Image (cartoon, helix red, strand yellow):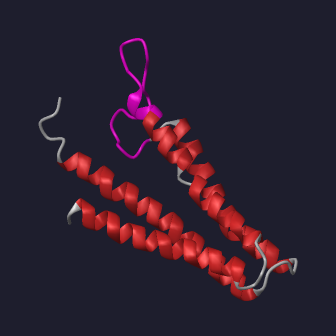
Amino acid sequence: MNPLNKIIFLSAFLASGFLLILLSCALFNNYRPMWVILIFLIAPLPNIIANSIENSRDYNFLTFNDYGNSNEGNSSPLQEFSKFLTGFLIISGIALPLSFYHCGLIEIGSLIMSVSGGLIVYGDIIIFIWFFSNEEEENDEFNF
């Protein structure tokens, strides 16, 4: 797929996710679900930061990397903590509108629209990262 087509496709999904969240706020005249946007935009950042730190580390003879010697499934404690933090933020993005609904601060329509819009925004960010990191690995055959 052409990279321009990927960007257009993902921007349409991102716009629909933002539209759902904004409509959940505007239609019910209650702007508390707007926090969902912030939470789902921050959610992938711990993984991105941890992966960039781990990829930029220089392992020489003075440092010992025990967690990545034979299996590629092993990850560092920093990466594990970033996965935990990302999971915490995703659950918080779903639980916050549920808590607002339970307390009677928002209605059921606002709950459904804000949670589905937030999941669309987060899914779009993850697909964007996957599309463009996969392309770098395919073209990295002869780079040393």
Can you say whether 123 is above or below 47 in the image?
A: below
**Residue at 83%, 79% in the rendered image:** 102
User: In the rendered view, does 100 fall on the left or right side of 8?
Assistant: right
Residue 98 percent coordinates (x, y): 75, 75
Total marks in image: 0
Can you say whether 144 is above or below 42 in the image?
A: above
Can residue 67 be found in the magenta stretch? Answer: yes
Can you say whether 40 is above or below 105 in the image?
A: above
Residue 98 appearing in the image: yes
Residue 90 appearing in the image: no
Can residue 123 be found in the magenta stretch? Answer: no
* Residue 110 quadrant: bottom right
Work out which residue is located at the far right of the displayed protein and give it. 103
Residue 44 percent coordinates (x, y): 53, 53
* Residue 126 quadrant: bottom left
Residue 47 percent coordinates (x, y): 51, 46
Instruction: Point out the stretch of residues depicted in magenta.
Output: 53-74
**Residue at 39%, 63% in the rendered image:** 127
Can you say whether 28 is above or below 1 in the image?
A: below
User: In the rendered view, does 137 fall on the left or right side of 18?
Assistant: left
User: In the rendered view, does 16 fall on the left or right side of 21?
Assistant: left
117 vs 59, nearest the viewer: 117
- Which image quarter holds the C terminus? top left
User: In the rendered view, does 61 fall on the left or right side of 87?
Assistant: left
